[in-house]
Image (cartoon, rainbow, N blue to C red):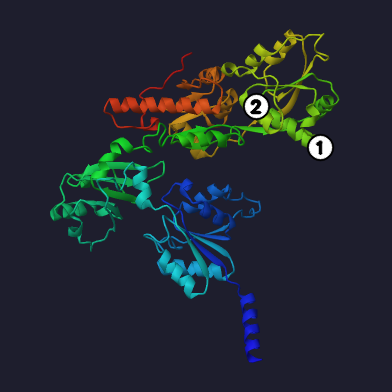
Amino acid sequence: MTRAKTTEQTAEHSSATPLGWVSFVGSGPGDPELLTVRAIDLLKQADVVVTEAPEHASMVRGVLGIPEPVEPTEGEETPEPVGPEFIDGGFGVDGQPLANAARAKAVVKQAKLGKRVVRLMTGDPFLYASGPEEAQSCAKAGIGFEIVPGVSSVSAVPAYAGIPLTTKDHQEVAVVTCNEKIDWSQYADNRTLVLLSGVGMIGDIAKELVAAGRSAKTPVAITRVGTTTEQSTVESTLENIAVDARAARMAPPAIVVIGKVVNLRETLSWFETKPLFGWRVLVPRTKEQAPALSLKLKGFGAVPEEVPTISVEPPRNPQQMDKAVRGLVEGRYNWIAFTSINAVRAVREKFDEYGLDCRAFSGLKIAAVGEKTGQALEAWGLRPDLVPNTDNQSAAGLLEVWPEYDADLDPINRVFLPRADIATENLIAGLVDLGWECDDVTAYRTVRAAPPPAPTRDAIKTGKFDAVVFTSSSTVRNLVGIAGKPHTSTVIAAIGPATAKTAEEHGLRVDVMSPEPSIEALTEALAAFGAARRASLVEQGLPVTKPSDRRPASRRRSRTS
């Protein structure tokens, strides 16, 4: 009886104080894309994330697609928080770094509340981290935990710098956490050395290694903020590294590599040599369209910053669109022409509203202004009958391939054109000349977005952006309207002749023009420009700089001025 009672009491106690679970997760060296699949899965499930570095909260929000918190304006209610709760495990309220015991206490406290806790740690939890001590605290408190290794900066940062730690000729490597008590004589051989926390005392370390027998000509590389687009590397030798590191303003976080493997960086450097490496690129597009362009730019090493300039809104009077869709279902039209992805989206939303699907297009011919619009139709289950040639995917290109109306072949001579409220009349005029009647229907409105924050406006005007990519004439007009004209040092890239002409009309000189109207071609053209610029600087023996690093003496003028 007594034993049964004890078990029952224990069960009651357990239900009253449920214990959570702690996942010690390595965040890697800095690049969010180096997070493991398991790490992302646990972050999605987490109730609480105990961070270590100031940038961890933004990293998690970015990975999970959670918006940054916005302070409510006066009179507004504080919005409900989205995603996990963030607790700073790196610094206390006084701004001082927390001791390992204090971090462990915060983790255990949250787990005892029955929460799923992710303890996010820089690099790897069990390598140069307080993971073992914090995990021991969980074990002592009877809290279950798991370890999710992260990509360690020990190997990742040198790899991003183009430095292999081992080769067939150099097969030994030693990792040293630096402090004042290291006996450097034990590292006098030719092993590759990876130094953690060594950048601040690199001069003294270099002297002691040379005194111990290492050659003063031994190659040394220091890479700071590795795997991020702020990464920079200085190459030197043991005899010169103190001066060179000071001149390059090397500071933590940084990884030091010592040994002949550093020489391979000359041929293996791949990250810092990307054509747009570190370029801050302004992406003025609609909120829906910006992510695809930003992803392409990131692939070339750029740091895209999205500034919405256009907001796509429903038409003020939906009756015209309602009437056109009913006419489509009733067989009023022979053709429907989609001149943008937004037009596809608008018609699809109207179909959803009426409970229709793509079967309502039966017997109707479909035209698309280009491949991207065609892909949006195919995602809906529709295959366009008419698409312009790839060298002229525009309204003009569509007119070039559009057939004349033939009363013997075409039972109906009417075309449904769902378009933006600011669409030009050229397409309609061309179709009328070909014998067709057009119902030009406002399917959506393009509205100028609100101005970006003051720091962004200042960056645009003062040349802190390296490039801006314009994907339509309206993005040019709207950006200038809400934020001002980009500085003359900023590289201007336009998606086609019409957009380039609009940019020039606003006093901008177009440096890059896409050979075809697509995001892929535009970003590749900008990357080619960046690569050519870099090659020219290297050939002249000049340091590789970004466009924002230079300030021309006089403003550039457009070709039309």
Q: Residue furthest front?
A: 168
What's under tag 1, amino acid-wise? Answer: Gly
User: In what element is the residue under mark 1?
Assistant: loop
Residue 253 x/y as whole percent: 35, 51
Q: Residue furthest bottom?
A: 1
Residue 434 x/y as whole percent: 73, 9
Q: In this rendering, does residue 561 appear at all? A: no
Answer above or below: position of 293 versus 51. Answer: above
Quarter of image, res 464: top left
Residue 373 is tagged as 2
Residue 508 x/y as whole percent: 48, 21
Q: Residue at x 29, y 25 (%)?
A: 539
Q: Residue at x 17, y 59 (%)?
A: 185
User: Which residue in the structure is indicated by mark 1?
Assistant: 355
Indicate which disc, 1 or 2, sits on the residue closer to the N terminus: 1
Answer above or below: position of 233 versus 310. Answer: below
User: In what element is the residue under mark 2?
Assistant: helix
Q: In the rendered image, which quarter contains the N terminus?
A: bottom right
- Cα separation between marks 1 and 2: 23 Å
Q: Dot 1 surroundings within 10 Å: few (below 14), some, or many (20 or more)?
A: few
